[in-house]
Amino acid sequence: MMKFRFRRQGNDPHREKIKQDLFAFNKTVEHGFPNQPSALAYDPKLQLMAIGTKSGAIKIYGAPGVEMTGLHKDTAAVTQIHFLYGQGRILSLLDDNTIHLWEIVQRENRSHLVEVHSFNLPGRPGIESTSATRVTVMLLKLSCDLLALGTEGGGVHFLELPTLTLLNKSLFQDEIMQSIPEEYKCGKSLGPVESLQQHPQDSDKILIGYSRGLVVLWDLNSRHVDNLFLGKQQLESLVWERSGNSFVSSHSDGGYMLWAVSSSNPCTHDPISSTIPYGPFPCKAVNKILWRTTESGSPLVLFSGGMPRASYGDRHCLTILQDSSHVTLDFTSRVIDFFTIHCTDKDKEFDDPSALVVLLEEELVVIDLQMAGWPTVPAPYLAPLHSSAITCSCHISNVPPRLWERVISAGQQQCPLQNYEVAELKDPTQKLKTSAFSPQVLCCHEDGTVRFWDASGVSLKPLYKLSTANIFQTDGDHNDSLTQAGEEEWPPFRKVGCFDPYSDDPRLAIQKISVCKYSGKLVVAGTAGQVIVLVLSDEKSDHMIDVATVDLLQDREGFTWKGHDRLPPKSGSVVFAPGFQPVVLVQCMPPAAVTAVTLHAEWNLIAFGTSHGFGLFDYHRCTLHPNDSLAMEGPLSRVKSLKKSLRQSFRRIRKSRVSGKKRVVVNSPTSKVQEANAQLAEHDAEVTPVQRRIEPRSADDSLSGVVRCLCFADTFLRDGTHHGPTMWAGTNSGSVYAYALDVPSQEKFSEQSVEALLGKEIQLMHRAPVVSIAVLDGRGNPLPEPYEVSRDLAKAPDMQGSHSVLIVSEEQFKVFMLPKVSAKTKFKLTAHEGCRVRKVALSNFTSVSSEEYSENALVCLTNLGDIHVFSVPALRPQVRYDCIRKEDISGIASCVFTKTGQGFYLISPSEYERFSLSARVITEPLCRVDVERPHDLSFSTLIIIIIIIIIIIILIIILLLIIIIINVSCAANQHIRMISEGSCDTEDWSNDAENSALHHRKKSHFKLYY
């Protein structure tokens, strides 16, 4: 009898433990500039800055790496935020008229921002409407024990801090109107409270400014009006002069006034001076003004707005005035708020501001107020990722120290760093293994720039900016000259900030990028078919760029390209600064956007593809030979009659774009190249049935020839005994082309050209677009990068066993054995999960338990926003996580995976969300901010006290119970003793007639006791 043993279905506990040590999903930190900022605050003691957003978030920033985020329960815009000086507390006012108190608390040895109280200002029943109690301005006393609220109804209310308790000493307009002269009243309301300012020398006095123009100096203790300032212009803001002898008011007419405060003159009708800097023509309102005294003598005046309406009403400006110095900072986005970093010590006589911090809608700008000319200070972080719209991005893991130093050096020469610190706080610790190699993120932009960022920590630090626009003649060159020629001297504008929403030429946009971190070579490809090879140089250079043109459709007679023109390169030599310098420009014709590009620096080869075909280029010889390949006369294809069907369908596919007849040159190498490219744009009219068709795919799809991915690999293609260089290309129609390359040795690079021969063709039956191609060695590991093996930076791949190729389409993953190209295993993602592949990468996951154990895995992001992890090469599902909302199409399209199991995706045009799939490699803020609150207990201390009180109460109750039990026990013992004594007396006296009376008394006594 035969016995069969079947494997029991279910999870393997040992494997589950391994997966827990390898995989864990965490969203760790948000990189970049906060989206839609709406409020700004600064604590000079703790040196912390807070930014509130329209989505209800509060973000705190200190030294690089010190970041905390708090999110309100309701997604209402944060309109105002204020720090409680030195206490690590923040007050926030939301658009829904609620006030919230936040605290920095310590949990698990790190700081968190936690909401502890909230308050909603009630109205007076029957007197005030809801709008009348809407808070317009908040004033926090320096003692941090009182909060004043100005409202639209003109009332001022007071809250006790930190409990946010409403005090019964509100100030209403009726009380103020009693002190106003009759001629000023005119039967008009004073309007909303626009500004509240505490007296710099007397904390019991506050300055109240009303929208109509009236300013009142109010004494909180005596509840009396000390001074009245009868302004006649609509008020926008107030600011005290440091001594308290004067203050400045800004107004809606674009001017500001200086008022003297004197006890001898309780009612002031006219200011000391009134100035409209950009008059006499009508100007916009001065929204906010600051007045800072300096030891040099003249005060420093800073205000936003005030520009002439007709000429510059659309400008976003901030003006700095001091003596004859006058600068109008011209920004590209709206000014939200600003503050100065200055001396806050009361014993000092002057403010002496050192820096100006301006929060704009799209960036943060810092101005040095101590250096001549007031230059811009480069920000160590919070630089806008979206200075130009991001078109693609790339992550480089384990950057060699030499390359890192050279990139930083080039960046410092572009923008010399200055010794400024945002905060002097304890450096954050990160749950990330330190390494001699650091990761970088490369962001490519619409204006043709590539920006390098340090992604090794919590905050993204800008390192270096590469621009490709200077090698082309763009449409913006003439506009710049006209702008410079017509620029006026007044107002003295100065362009500030790096956010530029407008591109000089949309053709400059970079679509694809490939980097070799060991050789310092970079390839960028753009919208107009330009492919640029750049080499990192430490010296300034002045040279000409080699230009090569590749006509992918040169055998199509009568072809008409209806798209944009190519970018004409500049003639002659061009000066390039230290950094990445272009050496070769390859121009694809027609100038369609490049859809795929890859680089192999060790072979001096690049491959690029568009919607019309793909090419192989030897940038060392600067040639693209017709014999090089891409000819379809290779070995047997796996798809029966593929070439025949492609040729048959060619005329149908290209009807709208190609007219005339195809020119055929017999036995011409050029015709073979073009024949190969033509097959990428053609499709079989007879669709082969597939197992499961999720979405019908048209045979006449004009996008079927788009090249989606390219890769180089040293593997077995011709036979199983000889391996060599190969190139692989995948298209939108599910076709994969593999070419065997004959690459000369390093000594013969300048003598011999690279030869290529079509080795294999693979047509996926389901015809889904090919997203990625990767070659695996005999052990199932991805092949190392160029130079890694030759420089002993990685283990040599297994060349003994049979290699395999992993082909990822939008619907399934499939592994083929090489060189026979026989299917080994596959996983039908769309058939099983009902989703499609959008992004994919091979990552290495290291176990938390042991550094020695690691696994390679295939990480996949789908169109539903979830992430799947599969083992390689078995393609077994491991874990699945929900990561991005399926409605967030831009976030899914922008996702980038790293080789260590992390990832980035855009949650807004200016912010990257960083996440980790690895249980070991996590980058998150673990900062600690130590604060002192002398007059109040911290949240954690309060919890401890409450717990101690509860324990004491429990002990008291237990003690009382013990006492009760002891008393009950004593009473019971006495009762038993009385019973025993009573029984003995009855027996002795029952036979004695003489003691009968005593017997009855005892018995009665016993009964009574009982």
Image (cartoon, grey):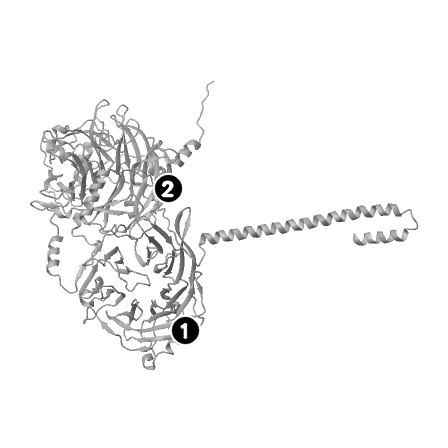
Q: Position of residue 945 (x, y in %)?
A: 50, 53
> Residue 746, relative to residue 364: is it above or below?
above
Query: Which secondary structure lies at badge 1?
Result: loop
Alpha carbon separation for disc pair 2 and 1 = 58 Å
Q: Residue at horizontal 16%, vertical 51%?
A: 505
| Residue 384 higher or lower than 352, as above or below | above
Which class describes the residues within 10 Å of circle 2: few (<14), some (14-19), or many (20+)? some
**Residue 142 location, quadrant:** bottom left
Q: Say which of 659 and 147 sits in front.
A: 147
Residue farthest toward the bottom in the current orientation of the protein = 182
Residue 285 against residue 960 in the figure, above or below: below
Q: Residue at position x 45%, y 71% from top?
A: 125
Q: Is residue 748 visible?
A: yes
Outermost front residue: 347
Q: Is residue 269 shown above or below 946?
A: below
Tell me, for residue 800, which label it has, or none: none
991 vs 586, nearest the viewer: 991
Amino acid bearing label 1: Arg
Q: Position of residue 25 (x, y in %)?
A: 37, 41
Q: Nearer the viewer, mark 2 or mark 1?
A: 1
Q: Which residue is mark 2?
A: 25
Give the x, y percent position of residue 764. 26, 33
Crowding at mark 1 (Cα within 10 Å: few <14, some 14-19, many 20+): few
- In percent of width and height, residue 126 lies at 44, 72
Q: Which residue lies most toward the right here?
A: 993
Whether residue 585 is visible? no
Q: Tag 2, which secondary structure?
A: strand
Amino acid under label 2? Phe
Side of 130 relative to 549 (left or right): right
**Residue holding disc 1:** 223
Depth check: give the residue in front, 682 or 480: 480
Q: Earlier in the sequence, mark 2 or mark 1?
A: 2
